Amino acid sequence: MTRRAFDYSRWDGTQVGFNLDADSLLAEMADDLTYHGDPNAALRRLLQQGMRDSNGEQMMGLREMMKRLRERRRDEVESKDLGGPFAEIAERLREVLNEERAGIERRVEAARESQDQRRKEIVEELGAERNFELDMMPPDLGGLVKALQEYDFMDDAARAKFEELMDEIRSELIKSNFNQLSEGMSNVSPEQMARMKDMLADLNQMLEARGRGEEPDFDAFMAKYSDFFPGNPATLDELLEQMARSMAAMQQMLNSMTPEQRDQLQQLSEALLDDVDLRWQMDELGRNLQNAFPDMGWQQSMGGQGDQPMGLGQMSEMLQNLGDLDQLESMLQNASTPAQLAEVDLDRARELLGDDAARSLEQMREMTRILQEAGLIDQREGRLELTPRAVRALGQKALGDLYRKLLKDQAGRHEVEQVGAGHERAYEHKPYEYGDPFNLNVEQTIRNAVFRAGAGTPVRLLPEDFEVERTEVLTRSSTVLLLDVSMSMPMRDNFLPAKKVAMALHALITSQFPRDHFGLVAFGRVARDIKPELLPELSWDFEWGTNMQHALMLARRQLSRESGTKQILMVTDGEPTAHIEDGEAYFQYPASPVTVEETLREAARCTKAGITINTFMLDADWGLRNFVEQLTRLNRGRAFFTSPDNLGDYVLVDFLEQRRVRRTG
């Protein structure tokens, strides 16, 4: 489908536009980006399912468009009577016959009135012969057309009407076989028909050359025959695919016809395309294209026939519509990025699918540009990647979602004092005492002096007037989050909520507690340090094993380089089933006593280093509960039995409660 220019109209207040912006797109893609960290996959999913904007307007997805395409195709086929063109041709041929008979009668009558006896005898004899020939015409369409082609008309108007009908049928037959290229093949003059035969012969030669492993000169072919191909295909493959779709659609229509209808069409083709070489070239092209594109559905039929009459000129129109529907469906089916929709003809899509689908396609094509201009994605080596800004935005969104849920839930033991969170000011003041930091509250100090001495200037300050700000003493906190990425996490739908919590915690610490340390360790069969900025790209391990021992070891090493209070937050859904032994990961399920022992030994090292371990369990099976009970007795940390729905509540609130130590001066 060729790309056309856009149409513009003056805004009159009635048009409805889809409000697509970077924030809306990122919000729709957030879960996919959090889960996989791949903007390519997230955009692909968004293209498929569509979305709603902030105003509630629906952008149709490709899946819904393809469903509508198939429904339109079914309606196009099942409503039409494929025998309609033959009935129209038969009726118009009867009109030709009647006009010829009337013309014969006029010629005979004129000869009788001329008083010329010789002329009268010749015309009457000729008229009788012609009427006899007309009486003996074959009843079938193909035979009747062939007989009339050999018939010597006496009436010029009847001859002109017949020749006009023949040109129309011939053009329709060519269009039906090459509906995607019909504009260049609509001229049925003898000269153009000869050029068409040469074009088909050259095309077949190119196909045969390609079959021998040679590379045909497509540019030379197009320079010679470009007028046949208004779509201006860029490559031989593109041209062949267009022609294959056209001929396959024609073949499917033939497969849907009754044997009598197929026979009529075959006879018409033989009568009108009477050049044996032309017919052979067309048949040869059809065979070559079937071999080149065997999956085009050549053996399929279009389904049952309807009762809506179809005229002669509608046969190629129906095939054109079906071809466009198939081509559009193929484009949408293969589109995995917004850029691949650039070649869709929006005007044609609007005709086939409606205004809402065309608007949605137009918006889809802009998605990548909108995200790039907002600084959320970059294109590197042909792939889209998240920018640091996007990573921060995803973390802030996860954090905002958790805070909103906390406010909504109002869980009693999750209440968090909001005053001064993350800042040194406590927004309270007190009289200055010796030793206090001199964080002067100017407003209250002057007010005290005015209250003491009364209004007037100058205002004279005394030591007892001074008030200072109360402050929070915020201890530096160092936190390492241990995130279980073993196979059980995605299998139990625990991975996405856990990763959201990690991103929210990272966003909270970097934005509100910038002096704090936040580390991340992912653990499956083995554990590994993860840079927090690479969180969106983190996925689960495609192997079994929950190696808490290795994770605790890496976290302890991270925290050994940090100061302040130290804690480990561990999110998991299974008991330890792996540990490091002689430099290799050892895995056993059910959990080996050796693995449990090695994990607790590492927890003891953490305890000795002053590190608190708080565990958040997403599965309360006996093995995990038993292990965590041992862990908490050893470390004196806390354990939370939680679920994917409220995991964020527990982790966020627990972090804030443990993080903030308030002291007034």
Image: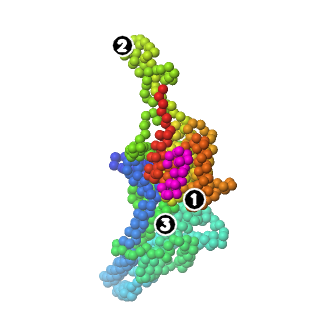
> Of label 3 and label 1, which has the lower sequence position?
3
**Of the two numbered discs 3 and 2 in the rendering, the one whose residue sits closer to the viewer:** 2
Q: Which residue is drawn at the image coordinates 45% and 18% (left, top)?
A: 466
User: Could you tell me how far apart the alpha carbons at marks 2 and 1 are, in whole angstroms?
Assistant: 78 Å
- Residue 591 is labelled as 1
Q: Which residue is drawn at the image coordinates 54% and 51% (left, top)?
A: 630
**Residue 475: image location, x then y, percent:** 53, 34
**Residue 9: image location, x then y, percent:** 39, 49
Question: Which residue type carries mark 2?
Answer: Gly
**Of the two numbered discs 3 and 1 in the rendering, the one whose residue sits closer to the viewer:** 1
The answer to which of 465 and 82 lies nearer the viewer is 465
Q: Quadrant of residue 106?
A: bottom left
The answer to which of 552 and 366 lies nearer the viewer is 552
- Range of magenta residues: 619-639
Q: Is residue 440 left or right of residue 124?
A: right
Question: Which residue type carries mark 1?
Answer: Ala
At mark 2, the secondary structure is loop
Q: Which residue is drawn at the image coordinates 39% and 88% (left, top)?
A: 136
Can residue 516 be spotted in the picture? no
User: Could you tell me how far apart the alpha carbons at marks 3 and 1 are, in whole angstroms?
Assistant: 66 Å
**Residue 134: image location, x then y, percent:** 38, 85
Q: Is 287 inside the magenta-drawn segment? A: no
